[in-house]
Image: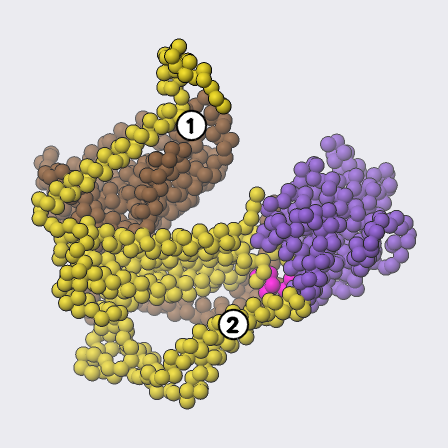
Amino acid sequence: MTTQSQHAPKMATPLEPVMQFDPNAKVPFAKWVQKHLFTSLWQSLMTLVVAALLLRFAWFVLKWGVIDAVFYTPDPDVCRAAAGACWAVIVEKHRPMLFGLYPYDEHWRLVIMMVVYLSTIVASLMPKLWNFKILIPLWILSVTSIGILMFGGVLGLVYVPTSEWGGLPLTMILFSGTVLIGMPVAVVLALGRRSPMPVARGVSVVFIEALRGVPLITILFVAVNVFPLFLPAGVEVNKLLRITVGIAIFFACYQAEVIRGGLQAIPTGQYEAAASLNMSYWQTTRKIILPQALRISLPAITNHIIAAMKNTSFVIIIGLFDILTATTAVMQDPLWRRYYIEAYLFVAAVYLFFGYALSLYARQVEKWINSGRI
Amino acid sequence: MSNIIAQTQSPSPSPSPSPSPSQRLDQGPMIKLRDVSKWYGHFQVLHDVSLDVRKGERVVICGPSGSGKSTLIRCINRLEEHQKGEIIVNGIEMTDNVKNIEKIRRNIGMVFQSFNLFPHLNVLDNLTIGPMLVRHMKKKDAEELAMQFLEKVRIPEQAQKYPLQLSGGQQQRVAIARSLCMQPEIMLFDEPTSALDPEMIKEVLDTMIELADSGMTMICVTHEMGFARTVADNVILMADGKTVESGTPEEFFGNPKNPRTRLFLEQILKH
Amino acid sequence: MTHIDGSDQRGAKPRQTLSTLLYSKSFRTAVTQVVMAAVVIFIGLFLYQNVVENLRAQNIATGFGFLEQTSQFDIGEKMITYSARDSYGRAFVVGLLNTLSVSAAGIFLATLIGFTVGISRISSNWLLSKVATGYVEIVRNIPVILQVIFWSVLLRNLPNARNAVEVYGVGFLTNRGLTFAVPATHPIHSTMGIALVAGIVLAILGSIWARRHRESTGTYVNMLWPSIGLVIGLPVLAWLFGGAPTAISYPVQKGFNFQGGVTISPEFTALLIGIALYASGFIAEIVRAGLQATPKGQIEAARSMGFRPWFVTRYVVLPQALRVIVPPLTSQYVSLIKNSSIAVVVGYPDLVNIGNTVMNQTGQAVEAIAVMMLVYLTISLITSTFMNFYNRLVAIKER
Ligand SMILES: Nc1ncnc2c1ncn2[C@@H]1O[C@H](COP(=O)(O)OP(=O)(O)OP(=O)(O)O)[C@@H](O)[C@H]1O
Ligand SMILES: [Mg+2]
């Protein structure tokens, strides 16, 4: 079986003349090109067309984005005169784009916050540090310092209410809030859906299917407009928190289905083995079943985590100032609004960067799992 | 080519006594390999392999894993390309001529280690699709033929089931029947029993022995030495892409010339 | 199974029975469930109570009576007649139809691009497959809302009608939308539509006939080209019979607008391009996975039986690929429909956009949101019913 799968599917490639076959020759570049790009007339034609289009596009990008571009100028008129891109808009406007409505003089706090945030995340992603004795103090420390930096009001820092938070830090907070709240909810929902108890199963199924059946926006509307009605008079919950929970629960419903898939893939033998060791339901679940289920569904889990990052951008509809909303607002500036393409490309690049980093990490984790390291 | 059909259609399928080798093997070679070499990149899998198979001959190929057995028989119906030497089947040389490849393939049936049945078709459809599409048979005729062969492999009652509902041994017998439905003159077997449990191996081997008795030309890659001893006219040992030993079962098992053969036999008979 | 000693025991040894009960698994499960149900019901009642009280305190009406009230707002794009004097209910219908029309166009476009890119992904042409991979990675990983906003800003920054960008003489790009030439209306067009439907029906009947013919005579008739011929040829024939009208309604610039031709609004276009390109990336991956789902061994088995390449594709690869492709493809379609709900960021009047307006005007957030959710839930439910049905139909039978 293993050898079978090694045989690459062969399309009818012409047999090379026997006389010319030199088994000891290195596969030269020209051969490679011939084999992958010019096997037949049709293939060659396609290669030429694609290459022509690609070159044209690349040339356009090079000319517009580099050769004719303006990289730095405080004067929009310089950009107006240039034929190419105006990257100066990013240089000029990066602060409102990245930090939104946050008071201008306090931006340095956000820079520190992002450094703390990113280093905490990077540290938590390293298997070497996967130890509650390290992680719990680390997280307490960094969540506290992020809170102090963001809110202020102590240590002589100006108080900044959540309504003035914005930009990339807000996107980061929304994203990690979604994952941190959503993952446990997802696990509970998934276990509920697999539970032998009809009530638990029923509640989970209805919850999961109902939320998966509606768009995220309607859930955000609920968080903003309906949720306050649920609370007794006088009780209020912060809007940012409500929205984060809304996105998190939406995320959890999708993730629950993924985890359920992982749970289903676990052979009954595992349950029986645990039962024969006299383990309780919760012990079995926590120590035997969940670790395996999460490993199995890891690729799909990471897909939904990346999707959660993209989904934070939906808050533009309810007026939260994440990086996208902030950029859109900045692009109202009559002096610079002509350069919206550059600005949005920048935002897209930010999303692509973080998405790519996440998926690279996920691939690494899969390798660790396959090699039995975790 | 029609002798199996004739047999299955005869009202009393009393197993005709196997004719003696000299009687069966009187014609010239049906498959002729001359100095066949093949490379995967820089790695040479086959080194100047030569082999003649006459009509009705049964050849068993064995050898250690990775020695190129599968590659060799896959070259015979061009699932793999060889780069040097010549392969002639029924007088047609194997080149990249598509028409010739089709002609050759129509005469060669192949049975794989992993069955490779089509899981979306039921057993009957698995058997009839080839004859209908390639041999332009009517559906009715194809189904009749299929049922004959299902009876021959002793599972006519499974005709309406789907492959994945069958046991491994049953699946392999369906796969053999599927190849036979194409009415080939030659059958290639690539370790047909090595994915099976011991109790299923026997039912598949029995089918293959019956097939051999009916006079089919067969090339089998297998490690079933009992099968080789009783059925083969010619046993070949491959090692490192070369044929290192070739002879009748008596010679091969009783008096191997090459020390590698002895080593191989020792290892395989230990289990 | 009659055990009278059970009642005897209860009388004799009450303690043991109680502990048997307390330690019995089914009893514990039952109690847990009752508690769970109670908690759920309690929370539900509590929330309901609060909502009722809050609404009363804020003087907000309840119930769906508002659907009959006059809406007093107009809608830019509509497929049925509607004015500010119509009801909220009708406004919702207008929104729903707009959602459905942009979704239908989006599904068509995304499928077309997705299949093309997906097939290119597994092309043996290295360059093509790399370009396809790059496309997929980019469109999938940029938030759909950013893509929609980008296209919308791009379209809004196009020049006005006076300086319209001309596209090969058949269309104009302006900040008021895409305007392009179409054949002038002619009665034969409806006949051509009927001919198209007839062509499709005949093509299907033709393939059924071809299969019957093959099964009864053994002769294979390839219906691929005849089918294409029928689907294209019949409308062309109808057109020829109608006197081959060639009049074309060209858009002509009139002041700040165009006359003639057809105009698609920039809102619709931006939303369409955004959600369609985003979905096309996912569809491409689904198609690729489906086409690669057939194990190589089966393809080899088919080839070793002398199948021609087209037969291998048609009878071995495609049937299995479709089983793998259709379920995730339908859920992609559903998520495209759900993604169309971001229309509000570009100002396209879809269901959610109109619901949002209604919500702001009436203050009846609960009901307005309930309407939106119900509509999407219905769409999802219908789709998943279809999908289950399809899956059951084509499921590969296993043990
Ligand atoms: N597609 C391929 N690309 C590169 N090397 C290959 C490929 N297929 C097979 N090989 C190599 O060619 C050699 C011979 O393979 P082959 O499958 O013919 O061996 P085999 O004798 O059938 O072994 P086994 O008993 O394990 O089936 C092996 O070393 C294998 O690794
Ligand atoms: Mg092998």
Visible residue check, residue C278 = yes
Residue situated in front as seen by the camera: B71 or C69: C69
Residue in the image at 62% along x and 49% along y: B161
Instruction: State the hue of chain C.
Output: yellow
Residue in the image at 19% along x and 37% along y: C46
Q: Amino acid at mark 2?
A: Ala
Instruction: State the hue of chain B.
Output: purple
Q: Amino acid at mark 1?
A: Thr
Q: Label 2 is found on which chain of the structure?
A: C
A156 displayed left or right of C136: left
Q: On the image, numbered disc 2 is attached to which residue? A: C203
Verify whether residue C307 appears in magenta: yes
Q: Label 1 is found on which chain of the structure?
A: A
* Secondary element at image label 1: helix
Q: How many discs appear? A: 2
For the residues beneath circles 2 and 1, the answer to whether they share a chain is: no
Q: Quadrant of the C terminus of chain C?
A: top right
Q: Please determine whether, in this image, residue C136 is positioned above or below residue C242.
A: above
Q: Quadrant of residue C344?
A: bottom left
Where's residue A349, x and y in %? Answer: 30, 55
- Identify the magenta region: C305-313
C377 displayed left or right of A326: right
Q: On the image, numbered disc 1 is attached to which residue? A: A284
Visible residue check, residue A26 = no
Residue in the image at 77% along x and 61% along y: B88
